[in-house]
Amino acid sequence: TPGARRDAERRLRTVPALAAAPAHFPGIGDLADDCVAAAADRIVAAEGGPAWDDDGFARLAEAARVRLAPLAVGAAGQAADLVAAAIALEARFQVTRAPVLQPAVDDMRAQVRALVRPGFVTATGLARLRDVGRYLDGVRVRLDKLGDRPDRDRDLMSRARALERSYADLIRALPRDRLADPEVIDARWMLEELRVSFFAQVLGTPRPVSEPRVRKALDALAR
């Protein structure tokens, strides 16, 4: 992994915005580690899962020798763009000071910091990083038109947050061994897709999403 980490860090250092990232966003060193870990996860999954014997370990090690560095560098390129986009949004939040808009700004800030937090590359997985970019773009679209109809934004925010609270309550009630179930993870991303459909319809979603669909998914998880 040292070579892969070095290559990932070199890629990250080509993005000037990362050098002065606010403390709540990952720094270059932590982000490089995160990208290598996410690349390793992809390799382990592609090779059939963790190694339980010498032959399995040798297979994973050989795959890592070939693929770890390219995957980590690719992840670093995507992650750098995402952190830079999050930093740019954070700067816009700082200058949006109208009191009537502040609840929406606080909501968007919380969303961005949840999407682009320390460890987000591994937690998200390489396959979903492109979606995270779309979610951040959705925040930008929402912010662009926030002043036009703040009452409508407030209503949509209330509906989105109610479902997010239901999901959080459900997560707290689930046994720990269910938290990594595909259905649980999918429901979390459905909530992000719902925000896109609410606030940035122009960006589209890869599948139909609505409040009833999200409620149905949450009800199924609660059984």
Image: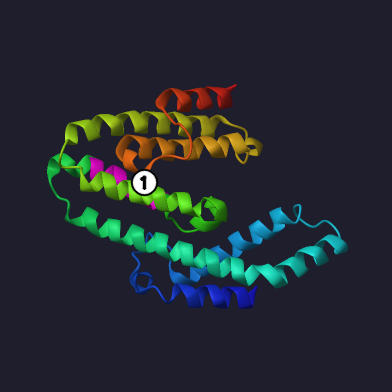
**Is 111 a magenta residue?**
yes
What residue is disc 1 on? 111
Q: Nearer the viewer, residue 188 or 66?
A: 66
Magenta region, main secondary structure: helix
Color theme of the render: rainbow
Q: Looking at the image, is 214 positioned above or below residue 48?
A: above
Q: Looking at the image, is 4 positioned above or below residue 100?
A: below
Q: How many marks?
A: 1
Q: Secondary structure at mark 1?
A: helix
Q: Where residue 95 appears, x then y in whole percent?
A: 17, 56
Residue found at x 41% / y 53%: 133
Q: Nearer the viewer, residue 63 or 159?
A: 63
Q: Amino acid at mark 1?
A: Gln
Left or right: residue 92 compared with residue 82: left
Q: Where residue 199 appears, x then y in whole percent?
A: 30, 38
Residue found at x 50% / y 75%: 9
- Residue 209 lies in what quarter of the image? top left
